[in-house]
Amino acid sequence: MKKTQKYVASSSEREGYFIIDNREAVSMPLFCDICSFVMRNSNDATFYKKFGCCEECGMTFAEPRSDEWEEGWRPDNDILVAHKEKMRNKSLQFKN
């Protein structure tokens, strides 16, 4: 079954629907599959489309090990705990 989205367009002259074929669209989750942090912006969407994770995880884990990543490698729990702590500290620096 083909997925489509409908958008209402209105103007003073006409109203109607645009049917957009979005079979190529990738639905991005709200949270990164690797670090579980919230997906924040279009960069996260780009990295999710390419690697299945947020930008930060993509730059930290996926790009440096792109061949291993393609084969299914993912960081172990100890590495993720340290990564999440670094991310939390980074976000706290921006708040102060």
Image (cartoon, grey):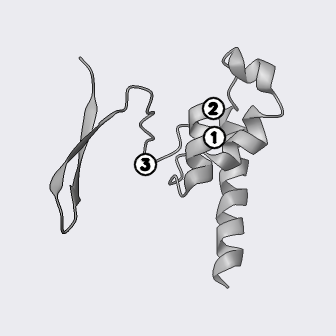
Could you tell me which quadrant the N terminus lies in?
top left
Query: Which residue has dot 2 on it?
Result: 50
- Earlier along the polypeptide chain: callout 3 or callout 1? 3
The x, y position of residue 56, in whole percent, is 69, 49
Closer to the camera, 92 or 27? 27
Mark 1 sits on what residue?
47
Mark 3 belongs to which amino acid?
Leu
Mark 3 vs mark 2: which is more N-terminal? 3
Please say if the residues under marks 2 and 1 sit with CB atoms less than 8 Å apart. yes
Q: Distance between the residues labelled 3 and 2?
A: 16 Å
* Residue 54 in view of the camera: yes
Judge from the rendering whether residue 37 lies leftward or rightward of residue 72; answer left or right: left
**In this rendering, position of residue 11 left or right of residue 55:** left
Q: In which quarter of the image is residue 2?
A: top left
Residue occupying the point 70% across, 18% down: 70
User: For numbered disc 2, what is the local secondary structure?
Assistant: helix
Label 3 residue SS: loop
- The mark closer to the camera, 3 or 1, is 1
Q: How far apart are marks 3 and 1 (CA)?
A: 14 Å
Please provide percent x and percent y for residue 55.
66, 47
Q: What secondary structure is found at the residue carrying circle 1?
A: helix
Instruction: Return the residue at label 3.
Output: 30
Please identify the residue farthest to the top as the structure is shown.
71
Residue 67 to residue 90: above or below: above
Disc 1 marks a residue whose amino acid type is: Phe
Which of these two is toward me, 89 or 3? Answer: 3
- For the image, the number of numbered tags is 3
